Amino acid sequence: MKLNHVFGRFMCLSAILSPFINAEAEIKMPAFFASNMVMQQNTEGKMWGTANPSSNVTVSPSWTDQKYTVKSAKDGKWTISFPTPEAGGPYTITVSDGTPTLLENVMLGEVWLCSGQSNMEMPMKGFKNQPVEGANMATLHSKNPNIRLFTVKRNSSTTPVDDVTGKWAEATPASVRNFSATAYFFGKEIEEILDVPVGLIVVAWGGSACEAWMNDEMLSAFPEAAAKIPGKDDKIQSKNRTPSVLFKGMLNPLIGLPMQGVIWYQGEDNWNRAHSYTDMFSTMIKGWRNLWGQGEFPFYYCQIAPYDYSIITEPGQPVYNSAYLREAQAKVEQIVPNTGMAVLMDAGWDKGIHPPKKRIAGERLALLALNKTYGIEGIGAESPVYKSMEVKGDTIEINFDRAPEWIAGKQSFESNQFKLAGEDRVFYPAKAWISQKKVLVKSDKVPYPVAVRYAFENASEGDLFSTDGIPVSSFRSDDWPDECLPKE
């Protein structure tokens, strides 16, 4: 009886401790290695996590009879690589160190990271009093098991973290409603045209600064921002703007995840720091690429849309011209390989920083990817860009690059968004008309023009396009300083 009593107590204690013992032995992986995920096709796949220290971890994908094994380190960490074939699925992946973990409904296809601030984060359901145009019907028709969605939960940290909070979901009206509109419209086009599964991972936070998405090393080139990097135990002054905190809290766990590329929609928070944005954004792109170790992966981004920034300017403060930020963004695709900018001059909202035309943003990013990354010919993807000007009497003739089929107006052969200036550097509204591949500009108030600007204001609505309907970015021929811009 006494022995039975002791045995009974032992079994009871074992039952209590069993979940904890098993939990310790259980394979653990970041949240994005899970059922319903998409893995990048035709590449060297990669997974990582923790297991029992110094144990053999075996990965068994169902698309092959091959098993892949690696030994975990003394701290239990492990990383394993294995080839992935062409798109397909659904598959299963079993990961085991003696206790198996089964990932189900896994697809192979195209994986894209979707990052930035609120215009990337903005869901299909919109923000309060700020709808997404056409979203309700698009959401109604969104059910598609080939599109998989993952949103990284907001997290700001002073030290690099190893995991994120989030969950993969198939595209359904319920999941799409709460997912990034720009990212969804992008992914929908990629999936439809390529006919392969698409995985979209959103890593975005409204109001976030470019500086917040860079690590300490990247920021070292920018002393003013680097000085604001918080120490390990420091209080974070701004959860979404403090340098490095979103890189450490949201992006760091994803580094090394095999993917096709990145789409980015950010810049609104940097609108009053245009003087540093070209260098900063370029440094960020190069820094991400170096960390991923995946070469110069595609990086496509949205140019900020027209908006009247005077609305958010504090009394007594200068009203910056966001056209300088758009100019800084435009320079990046000229100096950083394998990038492209989606111009949104026709998709802004002068009274709201969150324009409703998210379908346009997503589709223009998709055009860049389909043309430049996936090699689809016969489509227009890139905006015409200002090349040069020539003064002929009282008229300026403007030439463009990337305009093989000439230049087009919005509804006519004229534009009302041009201004001219003479030696006094005072700009006046001008008449502009299209002649084949050139735009001619003239103003009665500027008989001897020396400089021209197009839509170079906060909230100008662009009316100049390629014949494929891709708008021209705001631009200027001069390099004159603006008294409202921060000095270098």
Image (tube, rainbow, N blue to C red):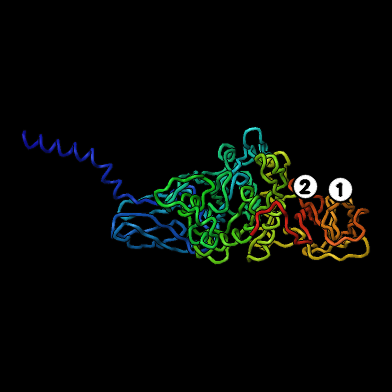
Q: Position of residue 396 (x, y in %)?
A: 88, 61
Number of numbered labels in the structure image? 2
Name which residue type carries label 2. Answer: Ser
Q: Is residue 365 visible?
A: no
Position of 412 relative to 369 (above/below): above
Label 1 near label 2: C-beta < 8 Å? no
Relative to residue 332, is residue 356 depicted above or below?
above
**Residue at (32, 55) in percent of width and height:** 97
Q: Nearer the viewer, residue 156 or 99?
A: 156
Q: Residue at x 67, y 44 (%)?
A: 358
Judging by the rendered image, the residue that carries numbered circle 2 is: 460
| Rendered image: mark on residue 487 | none
- Mark 1, residues whose alpha carbon is within 10 Å: few (<14), some, or many (≥20)? few
Q: Position of residue 178 (x, y in %)?
A: 57, 39
Give amino acid for label 1: Gln
Q: Secondary structure at mark 2?
A: loop
Residue matched to label 1: 411
From the top left corner, tell me how far across and down residue 273 is, in percent. Answer: 63, 53
In the shown orientation, is residue 268 left or right of residue 47?
right
Tell me the element at label 1. Answer: loop
